[in-house]
Amino acid sequence: MVMGERENPQSLLITGGAGFIGTNFVRYLLRHTDVQVVVVDALAYAGQHCNVEQWQGDQRCSFVRGHIENAELVEYVCRTYAVDTIVNLAAQTHVDRSILDVHPFVEAIVRGTVVLLEIARRLRLSRFVQMSTDEVYGECLVGECSEGSPIVPSSPYAASKAAADSFVQSYGRTYGLSTLIVRSCNVYGPSQFPEKLVPMSILCALHDELIPLYGDGTQRRQWLFVEDLCRALWLLCRVGQPGQVYHVSSGIEQENREMVEHILQLLRKPRTLLSSVPDRPGHDRRYALRWDKIRDLGWEPQISLEEGLKQTVEWYQANRSWWEPLWTGPYARYRQQWYGQLSQSGAASWGMV
């Protein structure tokens, strides 16, 4: 097939498919399409083997454990499963961890993306979809960022995403690879690792523990339920224009404090569980995306914030066996160390935990 030709994908490689967005996207594809899916995931701390187990027995889905930086492995997978489309969801995603140690982010996000692009170029795959973030634009205090807004990342995580995006765009322009970039607002929903604001708040509240909020908690974000993002990803896999950036957002903007208060109301827990902690370095006050381009393709978010949070809270209440080992395992130690280090403040205190 000539690179750039567009037809419905038949065999998708989902990198990072055992993580939060990946798990939900694979589930969406198996429920709503007839495509073949192969997942490559290293099962690092945020990629859970229990997420993989739910697909076992479905002949349309295969799992390969490994790092996307392993070019031989990825090429073998692409050839073996006749992959025509790569959806790159593999990433280290937590800003706090990137502040402590940027190297895993450079390895997984920047180097990993380049490895995937090179394989897609050599094998002349029909499509490469890169999952990115609104954080590449940096702080947006007024209005909304368009797909052409300047890239000014604030955190090491955002900088690694911006670098990966640049490589994606360069492979499209230089080699004619059919690439597109998806930048979403904050995503929440079932199966999200507890370090993120929504699941952390739910689990703290279920344990009657204080919920840490950075600074005054008035940082503003747009919020999108993960199933709406999955619908957008599948649409763009089919009809997104090569070389384009697409924003995916809900237009629903909330302060972090307001999100946590919604969760406390759903769980009938007191607001006294809210606890202010020192703000993290370089914390952007606000992100906001304009998303007209994907709306013109017929996509609209379908899940309201109220319904999405309700479904999310109910999922964590019903799936204690999924999150309890995470909450009481290594992440518990990380959580104590991270917030302890925050209390020290000062740039000189930042280092490995």
Image: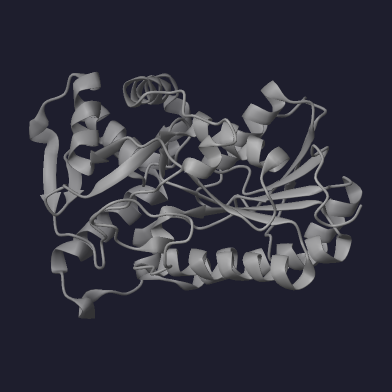
Q: Is residue 321 visible?
A: yes
Q: Quadrant of residue 320?
A: top left
Which residue is situated farthest in the left direction here?
A: 272
216 left or right of 96 in image: left
Coloring scheme of the render? one colour
Residue at the (83%, 50%) spot, across then down: 5
Image position, residue 26 (x, y; %): 65, 34
Q: Quadrant of residue 187?
A: top left
Image position, residue 135 (x, y; %): 39, 58
- In this rendering, the count of numbered labels is 0
Q: Quadrant of residue 279?
A: bottom left
Image position, residue 213 (x, y; %): 18, 47
Residue at the (67%, 59%) spot, across then down: 67
316 left or right of 28 in image: left
Residue at the (7%, 33%) spot, across then down: 272
Which residue is situated farthest in the bottom direction here?
A: 348
Q: Nearer the viewer, residue 226 or 211?
A: 226
When the figure is inspected, residue 220 is found, relative to residue 98, above or below; the finding is: above
Residue at the (79%, 32%) spot, across then down: 35
Image position, residue 170 (x, y; %): 66, 71
Quadrant that contains the C terminus: bottom left
Q: Nearer the viewer, residue 159 or 203?
A: 159
When the figure is inspected, residue 121 is found, relative to residue 227, above or below; the finding is: below
